[in-house]
Amino acid sequence: MKEGVRLAITGKNPATLDAARKELGSSVLVIESDASKVAAQKVVAETLRREFGGLDILFVNAGIAELKPVEQWDEAAFDRSVGINLSGGIRVNAVSPGPISTPLYSKLGLSEADVKTVAASIQGQVPAGRFGNASEIAHAVVFLASDESAFTVGSELLIDGGMIL
């Protein structure tokens, strides 16, 4: 791996974990885990301690979007959103991405034409005129994990193509 890191990834979907393992290489430690379950995170921590002896950096990248009116949410949807989006660990620095080209948009239950319409609408709000890509987020994370950011504490790195402006 670049930068000499040992990498572990977690996730719930075996297919995406397998795809990540193929892309990242055989040296990556892949742990199947549900980010919304506290007990599952204890298993992750124990596995990391056993395999790596400890951590130098933790990058938490879990989130879901329930893109429908709140009155249409059921209790399970609410619990899933809170469990994944808000029950994470302590974050000293944060990376806040804007619209990133990921499979999220295809999981919204919309037709392909509607997904394209939504994507065009979002893209129109981004001064950079495009969606970001995952490698741009990864570069920011590598920076925060590096010695170059040793004095960076309590910061939020916005990576949104200027959307927040």
Image: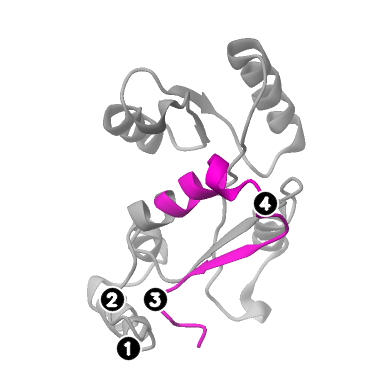
Whole-number angstrom distance, CA of label 2 to CA of label 4 = 31 Å
Badge 4 vs badge 1, beta-carbon distance below 8 Å:
no
- For residue 151, which numbered disc appears in the image? 4
Per the model, the C-alpha gap separating discs 4 and 3 is: 25 Å
What amino acid is labelled 2 in the image? Answer: Arg
Q: CA distance from mark 1 to mark 3?
A: 11 Å
Q: Which of the two discs, 3 and 2, labels the residue nearer the N terminus?
A: 2
Q: Picture coordinates of residue 85 (x, y %)?
A: 66, 57
Q: Quadrant of residue 49?
A: top right
Disc number lying in front (3 or 2): 3
- Whether residues under marks 3 and 2 lie with C-beta atoms below 8 angstroms apart, the answer is yes
Residue 130: assigned label: 2
| Residue 8 is one of the magenta-drawn residues | no
Q: Which residues are magenta?
A: 139-165
Farthest top residue in view: 50
Counting other residues with Cα less than 10 Å from the Cα at mark 1, is it few (<14), some (14-19), or many (20 or more)? some
Above or below: residue 5 compared with residue 114: above
Instruction: Give 56 or 152, whichever is nearer the viewer.
Output: 152
Amino acid, disc 4: Phe
Q: Secondary structure at mark 3?
A: loop
Between residue 10 and residue 15, name the one nearer to us: 10
53 to 149, vertically: above or below? above
User: Which residue is pictured at 70% across the width and 32% down the height?
Assistant: 41
